[in-house]
């Protein structure tokens, strides 16, 4: 009976932590959408809202970590349960970083409202952000359902985001070479695209934690990275 009582208490604690994770995930999803929308529509108020709302994401990460540490100290979880708690902390860390990248995008979006628009780059960036947001929705769904297959699908989809980033990188180079007046704006847009590419990496990290939860092992790191911009100059030369 005592062991059953302890396990039931642990389950309640875990449910509370996972509820915070899902709330955090919802805030992060909104941040991605709003940051990309603010960039495309040149909406400074929306960009400011993204920056201000990042504090709520940070607060939730702190609460998740504090609660996870309390559960470890109070419940003395078994190896399997401890794996779950550690994964929760890693998932919250990845979500917090995605929130930070959304905040950075919003900051640059505000700067870009003072500059002339550069061709059709904003819609392309929004599509890239939407791809990452859909990955995140599926990664969190896989986490709640412990769906290894869906998690592995999310991991593979990160290559598509990398390809979008590579295409945008080449566009920015072209626009800067065509007109030096585009250099400053394109540099801001490049950093925005890079932030979204990094978001994809963190979503992949969440999906990898799902695989770890289900199998006890992280997936093998044999997925080729699609970001090849570090080689771009050498290829063009």
Image (cartoon, rainbow, N blue to C red):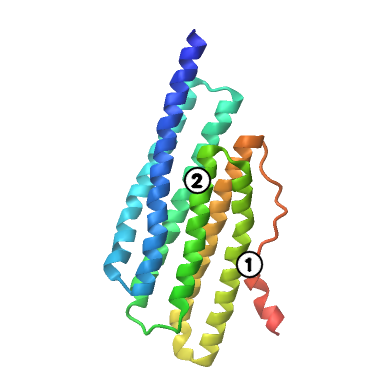
Q: Is residue 7 above or below residue 57?
A: above
Residue neighbourhood size for the residue with mark 2, other residues' Cα within 10 Å, grouped as few (<14), some (14–19), many (≥20): many
| Residue assigned mark 2 | 140
Residue 148: mark: none
Q: Which corner quadrant of the image does residue 35 belong to?
A: bottom left
Q: State the residue in front, 168 or 73.
A: 168
Residue 51 point in image, percent of width and height: 33, 60
Q: Which secondary structure, mark 1?
A: loop
Residue 32 point in image, percent of width and height: 42, 60
Q: State the residue in front, 237 or 144.
A: 144
Question: What residue is at 55 percent from the left and 89 percent from the top?
Answer: 177
Q: Which corner quadrant of the image does residue 77 belong to?
A: top right
Residue 227: mark: 1
| Quadrant of the rendering where the C terminus is positioned | bottom right
Please, which residue is most extreme toward the top here? 1
Q: How many marks?
A: 2
Question: What residue is at 61 percent from the left and 69 percent from the top?
Answer: 163
Residue 55 point in image, percent of width and height: 33, 51
Give the left or right position of residue 86, taking residue 63 as reference: right
Q: Are marks 2 and 1 in contact (CB under 8 Å)?
A: no
The residues tagged by marks 2 and 1 sit, at their Cα atoms, a distance apart of 24 Å
**Residue 74 visible (yes or no):** no
Question: What residue is at 37 percent from the left and 66 percent from the top?
Answer: 106
**Residue 209 visible (yes or no):** yes
Give the left or right position of residue 159, taking residue 29 as reference: right
Question: What residue is at 53 percent from the left and 41 percent from the top?
Answer: 143
Give the left or right position of residue 152, taking residue 76 as reference: right
Q: Which secondary structure, mark 2?
A: helix
Which callout, 2 or 1, points at the residue further toward the start of the chain? Answer: 2
Q: Nearer the viewer, mark 2 or mark 1?
A: 2
């Amino acid at each position: 009976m005592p062991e059953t009582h302890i396990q039931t208490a642990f389950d309640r604690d875990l449910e509370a932590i996972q509820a915070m994770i899902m709330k955090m995930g919802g805030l992060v999803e909104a941040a991605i959408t709003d940051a990309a929308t603010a960039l495309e529509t040149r909406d400074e108020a929306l960009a400011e809202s993204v920056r201000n709302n990042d504090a709520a994401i940070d607060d939730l990460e702190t609460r998740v970590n504090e609660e996870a540490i309390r559960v470890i100290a109070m419940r003395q979880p078994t190896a399997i349960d401890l794996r779950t708690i550690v994964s929760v902390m890693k998932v919250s860390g990845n979500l917090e970083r995605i929130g930070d990248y959304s905040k950075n995008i919003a900051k640059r979006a505000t700067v870009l409202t003072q500059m002339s628009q550069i061709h059709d780059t904003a819609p392309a960036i929004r599509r890239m952000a939407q791809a990452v947001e859909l990955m995140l929705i599926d990664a969190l769904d896989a986490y709640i359902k412990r769906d290894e297959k869906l998690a592995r699908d999310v991991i593979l989809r990160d290559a598509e985001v990398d390809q979008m980033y590579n295409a945008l990188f080449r566009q920015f180079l072209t626009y800067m070479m065509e007109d030096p007046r585009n250099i400053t704006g394109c540099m801001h847009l490049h950093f925005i695209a890079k932030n979204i590419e990094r978001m994809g990496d963190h979503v992949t990290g969440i999906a990898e934690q799902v695989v770890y939860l289900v199998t006890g092992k992280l997936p093998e790191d044999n997925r080729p990275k699609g970001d090849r911009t570090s080689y771009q100059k050498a290829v063009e030369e």
